[in-house]
Amino acid sequence: MVRNGGVESPSPRPRIHQTHPHDTPLFQSTVSERKLRRFNISIFVFRFAAFGSSISSAVFMLTTNTASSSDTPRWYHFGAFRFVVAANAIVALYSFFEMGASVWEISRGATIFPEFTQVWFDFGHDQVFAYLLLSAGSAATELARQLRAIGTCTANNAFCVQSDIAVALGFAGFLFLLISSLLSGFRVVCFIINGSRFVL
């Protein structure tokens, strides 16, 4: 307030009052926006890596040993290898969706779903699908060990090598998804503390 001849008049620069400790300004500083953009780009990179690893794993397993001999083992003859194909295909689809969500957020500065829903959706699904890939990879690794123990790989070495590559790519997808889960978990923590996904 400014006194003018004993009369109080409103200040030309009214103060902005924060009515609640969780209230946030209507704008983000340039520094915060740049930090958020870099953070979202990092998430996108790991989403892309998880997508590439998972889709490659599924393709490698689907194309194992295309020989026409009837006694040649096929991936669908083994439950663990079917599990690898299904798990990696699911994660590839999920990662593709999350890549689109990351591009949307980078370009528009907003989430596809409401912010509360988005941060928990990302974190929860990252956890579930990471454990799905880990379970599939562990089961396939044990099966591959058994196939080598009984001599299956002696006569069908190409099949075993290609299935091993598929399993390894699945573990790579798990690693990238695990890192994405850590980043999405950090966003959840920021949301719980600050009431916003923004990295301040």
Image (cartoon, rainbow, N blue to C red):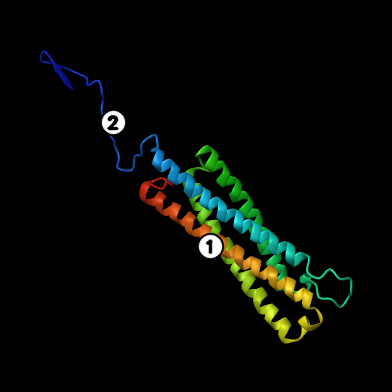
Image location of residue 129, percent across then percent down: 59, 61
Q: Is residue 146 left or right of residue 18?
A: right
What's the amino acid at mark 2?
A: Ile
What's the amino acid at mark 1?
A: Leu
* Image vertical order of residue 140 relative to residue 15, above or below: below
Q: Are marks 2 and 1 in contact (CB under 8 Å)?
A: no
Q: Residue furthest right?
A: 69
- Distance Cα–Cα, label 2 vs label 1: 42 Å
Q: Secondary structure at mark 1?
A: helix
Mark 2 surroundings: few (<14), some (14-19) or many (≥20) residues within 10 A:
few
* Image vertical order of residue 141 relative to residue 38, above or below: below
Image location of residue 118, percent across then percent down: 51, 48
Which quadrant, please, contains the N terminus? top left
Residue at the (26%, 29%) spot, across then down: 15
Displayed quadrant of residue 12: top left
Asked if residue 84 shows in the view, the reply is: yes
**Which residue in the structure is indicated by mark 1?**
178
Q: Is residue 160 left or right of residue 136?
A: right
Asked if residue 112 shows in the view, the reply is: no
Image location of residue 194, percent across then percent down: 36, 47
Mark 1 surroundings: few (<14), some (14-19) or many (≥20) residues within 10 A:
many
* Image vertical order of residue 7 relative to residue 181, above or below: above
Displayed quadrant of residue 77: bottom right
Q: Is residue 69 left or right of residue 73?
A: right
